[in-house]
Image (spheres, rainbow, N blue to C red):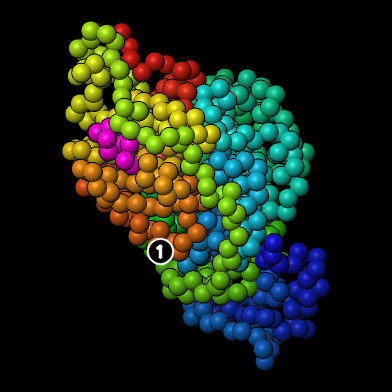
Amino acid sequence: MTHTAFPAWPAVAADLIAVAAGRVPADMVIRGGIWVNVHSRETLPGYDIAIHSGRIAAVLSDASAQIGPDTQVIEAQGRFMIPGLCDAHMHIESGMLTPAEFARAVIPHGTTSMFTDPHEIANVLGLAGVRMMHDEALMQPINIFTQMPSCAPSAPGLETTGHEITPEDVAEAMEWPGIIGLGEMMNFPGVAAADPKMLAEIAATQAAGKTVGGHYASPDLGADFAAYVAGGPADDHEGTSEADAIARVRQGMRAMLRLGSAWYDVAAQITAITEKGLDPRNFILCTDDSHSGTLVHDGHMNRVVRHAIECGCDPLVALQMATINTATHFGLEREIGSLTPGRRADVILTSDLTALPIETVIARGQVVAENGACLVDCPHYDWPASARGTVHLGHELAARDFEIAAPEGATTVRANVIGVVENQAPTKALTADLPVRGALVEGQGDICQIALVERHRATGEVVNGFVSGFGYTGTMAMASTVAHDSHHMIVVGTDREQMALAANRLAEVGGGISVWRDGAELALVELPIAGLMSDRPASEVAERAQQMMQAMRDCGCELNNAYMQHSLLALVVIPELRISDLGLVDVRKFEMIPLLELQP
């Protein structure tokens, strides 16, 4: 394994001092820019940045003394010089890309640091999968810090994963070079109840001096929330309201405001800063989940910063929330997050702080992107066969596997139905009176079938249910092996034959997303690595993803980024109602509930 070598500060400190003093020429000088200082929240015109050994040696009003015959000089021409952007919480797997291809996609958008929780692959491949993600991350020309996943399964007793993560796994991972902390602690009821396993994972992380990530998805901000905070999580990205953001920072947490492909939670929370006047240094921006289409066509952290500004946030405050605030939270303030001496030379040149065009990107003192083009190699890990053959259905599925039998003699049945909420992770727990035809319960109107197909242990098990909100019409089905967090297979459809076709297709190709209508496949996104990712170029995967989303629209779905809604229908730690391999889960109570209630 070859990791991208980057010298620690002690190894180059003497050289940085010599360059700053003008005794030794710099490797690179960025000349004549406006220095955006996120420590003092100022814009300072007429500054130069001297860079040596991948780090900033000095920021001076005149760095002529630092320029030698071999110094690379970049003319800023009065543009703003801002720190490289940091994504504080995200899952690379949600981009449908490996770390290398994800890096290639976001580098032109100015992202130079990511804090990634690979709990998706942990559910499929366990600690071995986390190590693969960690190792490929360390090979990249930008900073990808890995958080050791904490919850696989996310809710013990309510789902079955391909592998489980143990406190021993967490303790082992804390010794790896790229591990920055513990990934989001999704089992918030477990923490609030002082579950020994959860507390052992948190203790191992704190003993290593690293940050514990949070995930508190309950609207209850009373005693349960207080108990969760007392358990040690230091941040949270599940807030959806101003009250959520305020509660978190008042209790000493960092509030992470997310804008992903389908999560639009910045506008509702940023008023805590823009209207209530809370200290912005305890607020952080992140993406959480961005699929490849968003990355290629809309952007990454630059998109989030622009959005925060559009929501009324001062541009310099928005930049702090995507740079120094993040670095400070993870204990890396002396390493990344600002344009000051000693830090990694991660610099963006932009002509406008509000529109934020990303014109030049420098990472670790190397020009890595110009005007939207990635200029560096992003090395690939040699993914083994064990990471590619992960879809095990047990048998070829047929329409009968998706039948829902009605109680004998019933003509109408009351069913519990998952209700999709556009642009948010939570769902609604609904009920509906559904018709019975030929002794089988059928969907009607906007209500169609959902099934969770076990794919880790070849048990052949299929759990069936109902979902509303997608707006599908005609004879169709959509299947995905991206099914947060246990990552079995989710199949949604209006026709059982199409559901079987879609599921079997994914078994054939080793995982991904498949959309069918009238017996024909409309779109296929192949994700052969753990059934979650492709190692093909981001642009190619994004094109397939766009075709997939168009196929969803062709089947009648008009929701924004409905694929993300589909992929979260088995996420049994976010209210209100979800499906797992064990049945329907009422996440408000963390209890299993029946699909069919008594006949009305």
Q: Magenta stretch: residue 71 in it?
A: no
Q: Residue at point 69% right, 81% down?
A: 26
Task: Please give left or right for residue 520 compared with residue 484 in the image.
Answer: left
> Is the residue 503 above or below the residue 131 in the image?
above
Q: Residue at point 80% right, 68% down?
A: 11
The percent coordinates of residue 141 (x first, y second) are 60, 66
Q: Quadrant of the N terminus?
A: bottom right
| Region in magenta | 493-502
Q: Residue at point 38% right, 58% down?
A: 542
**Residue 178 seen:** yes
> Is the residue 94 above or below the residue 214 in the image?
below
SS assignment for the magenta stretch, majority: helix
Q: Which residue is mark 1?
A: 539
Say what secondary structure mark 1 lies in: helix
**Residue 243 seen:** no
The image quarter in which residue 358 lies? bottom left
The percent coordinates of residue 574 (x first, y second) are 46, 30
Instruction: Name the residue nearer the viewer: 413 or 143.
Output: 413
The percent coordinates of residue 108 (x first, y second) are 47, 67
The percent coordinates of residue 239 (x first, y second) are 47, 36
Q: Residue furthest front?
A: 395
Task: Please give left or right for residue 238 compared with residue 397 in the image.
Answer: right
Q: Residue at point 39% right, 15% down?
A: 594
The image quarter in which residue 599 lies? top left
Instruction: Name the residue nearer the viewer: 163 or 470.
Output: 163
Which three-letter amino acid code belongs to the residue tagged 1?
Ser
Q: Magenta stretch: residue 494 in it?
A: yes
> Is the residue 87 above or below the residue 557 in the image?
below
